[in-house]
Image (cartoon, helix red, strand yellow):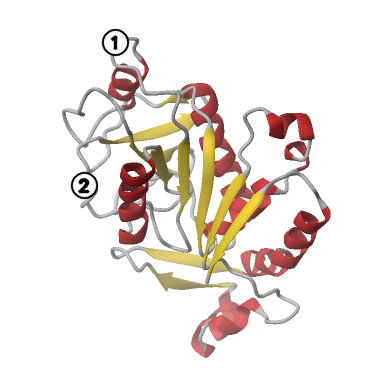
């Protein structure tokens, strides 16, 4: 765990929640969920700052004091790399945590990773194939980096299902405007083993067991276990249908047809 890392809870695009302290990086993501609230757990690793955080745990008020005050201001000349975790994962999964620390050191940039709604320490309701909410979460984080921290987003990385949000963000209609791209819009994206298969080629229901499919037919849902901690998640018929609607090929085709200067690097 790097000394220059701070955890906080982001409630809106340009503000942070002041009344909650997050567990440190080694704590289990088994925290009390409040589905009616929407707040994203984030971890930021800063580069080139002239101070060290007193603790790896902080309220968002302490984040504001340590990063945004004139005497201890974050270096806004350096960009921020955003990291999006994969299916049923969280921001402190080993790949994401190590990647954030290493990139910050080697590239001399800030890194920010976060938990999608309902995952890890983030509030909100977990849903299978929650693509619309994932896009909204990523957009909230991007806006916070630009408007809250006053930094540019240098690159957005998505691992596994996390790249679905990245791909949706990169193909938003308001990001295809050339003038916007020349200003502060992110142009660089990395795909780490992102999902590709389309529902037309492979029915999403086939990835689940026969027992789970029978439960879905009988009661309209089934439970799946978390890889981190002891949480169980409910998969419903409507979310299976949502997975069928999302098609990676549609977004990739849109990217190929749009000459907007964006660059994608893919690892598989």
As drawn, 101 above or below 128: above
Outermost residue on the left side: it is 54
Name the residue rendered at 59%, 62% in the picture: 129
Mark 1 or mark 2, earlier in chain: 2
The circle on residue 71 is 1
Badge 1 crowding class, 10 Å Cα cut-off, few under 14, some 14 to 19, many 20 or more, is: few
Name the residue rendered at 20%, 28% in the picture: 52
The circle on residue 38 is none
As drawn, 126 above or below 146: below
x, y percent for residue 147: 54, 23
Q: Which structural element holds mark 1?
A: loop
Q: Nearer the viewer, residue 242 or 155?
A: 155
The circle on residue 1 is 2
Name the residue rendered at 59%, 46% in the picture: 188
x, y percent for residue 69: 34, 12
Would you say residue 217 is visible in this rendering? no
Q: Nearer the viewer, residue 197 or 37?
A: 197
């Amino acid at each position: 765990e790097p000394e220059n890392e701070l955890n906080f809870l982001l409630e809106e695009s340009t503000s942070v929640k002041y009344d909650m302290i997050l567990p440190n990086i080694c704590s289990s993501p088994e925290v009390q969920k409040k589905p009616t609230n929407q707040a994203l757990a984030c971890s930021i690793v800063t580069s080139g700052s002239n101070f060290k955080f007193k603790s790896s745990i902080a309220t968002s008020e302490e984040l504001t004091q340590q990063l945004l005050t004139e005497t201890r201001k974050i270096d806004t000349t350096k960009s921020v790399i955003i990291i999006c975790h994969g299916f049923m994962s969280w921001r402190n999964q080993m790949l994401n945590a190590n990647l954030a620390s290493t990139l910050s050191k080697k590239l001399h940039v800030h890194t920010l990773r976060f938990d999608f709604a309902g995952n890890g320490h983030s509030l909100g309701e977990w849903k299978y194939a929650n693509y619309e909410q994932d896009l909204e979460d990523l957009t909230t984080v991007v806006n916070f980096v630009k408007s809250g921290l006053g930094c540019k987003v240098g690159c957005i990385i998505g691992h596994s299902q996390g790249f679905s949000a990245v791909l949706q963000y990169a193909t938003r209609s308001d990001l295809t405007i050339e003038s916007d791209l020349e200003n502060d819009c992110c142009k660089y994206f990395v795909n780490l083993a992102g999902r590709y298969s389309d529902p037309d080629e492979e029915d999403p229901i086939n990835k689940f067991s026969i027992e789970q499919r029978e439960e879905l037919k009988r009661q309209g849902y089934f439970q799946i276990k978390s890889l981190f901690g002891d949480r169980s998640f409910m998969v419903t018929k409507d979310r299976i249908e949502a997975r069928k609607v999302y098609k990676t090929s549609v977004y990739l085709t849109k990217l190929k047809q749009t000459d907007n200067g964006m660059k994608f690097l893919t690892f598989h």
